[in-house]
Image: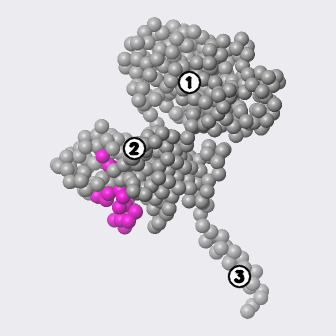
Amino acid sequence: MNHRNLPLLLLSAAALSLGAQAPAAKPASAKICTTCHTTAPDNLRGHFDNLALKNSSFQLRIDERVEVLRYDKAKVKVVTPEPAADVDAAFKSITKGHEVRVQYTEKDGVKTAVGVYAKPPVKLEAHESINLDEVQKLVAMGPEKGKYFLYDSRPAPRFMEGSIPTAVNLPFPAFDKNVAKLPADKAALVIFFCSGKTCNMSPGSLTKAKALGYTNVKVFIDGMPAWTKKNAGVLSPASLKAAYFDTNTPLVLLDVRPAAEAAKGFVKGAVAVNPTKVADLLKAFPSAKLKPPVVVVDETGGETAKTVAAEIVKAGYVGVNLLSGGFKAWQAATLPVETGALATKAVFVPKPRPGSISPAEFTKLAELAPAQRDAVILDVRNPDETKNGVIKGALLIPEPQLLGRLSEVPKDKKIVCLCSTGIRGELAYHLLKEKGYDVRFLPTEITIIDTGDFTID
């Protein structure tokens, strides 16, 4: 052997070794879950997403990615805070966005859930908790008169979307770095809250505060979900910019100042509102089912904005906030100001789910002759549904069979998935995206008749 070539051989071997390295493992837990939990092998932690009872499958959202899991109704164990009559009822009782732990097995790339454990409510001693009525009374008085200190234990991005008035952000994950925000008086009433009954961040903050010697610490267990059902929150001009404008997150922004004053300068996208005619505004307001974030702006964040926000909350809207300091605070922060005529009607278009195709774009595609389409329409409904009608030229593969029939799905073409409600279409989207397909899905309900014609809800 020529020893002069040995270094080159070693370098080549090293390069091959690096090139053959397996891709980085995907996180098994959502970031927020890692604050309080570790995740065992063959387990996932995240937020419960879409449920497809018809196909015995569901989606688990782990931050920016989605896992699709199957289950066998005869074998899966589903544990929820309240007992359920059967597996279907147990799954249906888990609300979208609820934190869950999933134990699974995997075969041929298919994950099958054998245990689904919905996060239970936090348990505290009676003297460690404070209820909504008590918090409302304190907030109405204010910290000086009420002699309290209120802390939002949620991460900063959630705080910036809106919080309880008078609250200071002290994120539990960064608690130890921010103890200077706590009062000097360790006998003072200190209250923590977070994302609701199952969130461990405020109880964790309580434990840390007690360890520091604070003797009058309480947790508002029901947290932001309970507050927003009954009250408006607040957010600062900087938070409005960072949480909504910088992220292009849709919202409804209401300017309740006199029209002549508002026309001199307003926040981009603001809708002019007469504070004496909120009932008329609500007649054409975006549906409460869409849960539109609403921000109400007056001159200084005063009584006019509070009254209008309260009426909107009373009408069944959650996520209603006042702009702290009003338009004057926005100006003082030297943030962009528009002039001219304000919009007169509140419009809200939710941010589309990743990978979705709009009904208008889908319709345009589906109405073309199959040979003229630049994408394959993949119908993932079950045979009992497709027998009633199929879009002409669509490829039919029931979603549960998709992974086993990938060879039938062309890899060199765009794919658009559909089902009757959008849920299984989205499941198929995630399965194909994972396999490297250029894929989208129709997120809405569609009815297809025997002629191939269709209507979209």
Q: In the image, is residue 350 above or below residue 281?
A: below
User: Residue at image x 74%, y 85%?
Assistant: 5
Going by the numbered disc 1, the residue's amino acid type is Trp
| Residue wearing tag 1 | 227
Q: Disc 2 vs disc 1: Cβ atoms closer than 8 Å?
A: no
Looking at the rendering, which quadrant does residue 74 occupy? Answer: bottom left
Residues rendered magenta in the picture: 396-420
Q: From mark 2 to mark 3, how far is it between C-alphas?
A: 66 Å
The label nearer to you, 3 versus 1, is 1
Percent coordinates x, y for residue 345 in the rendering:
41, 19
Q: In the image, is residue 253 above or below residue 178?
A: above
Compare residues 18 and 218 and report the one nearer the observer. Answer: 218
Q: Secondary structure at mark 1?
A: helix
- Dot label at residue 9: 3
**Which residue appears farthest toward the bottom when viewing the image?**
1
Is residue 279 at all visible to an observer of this figure?
Answer: yes
| Residue wearing tag 2 | 85
Query: Magenta includes 414?
Result: yes
Going by the numbered disc 2, the residue's amino acid type is Ala
- In the drawing, does residue 73 fall left or right of residue 100? left
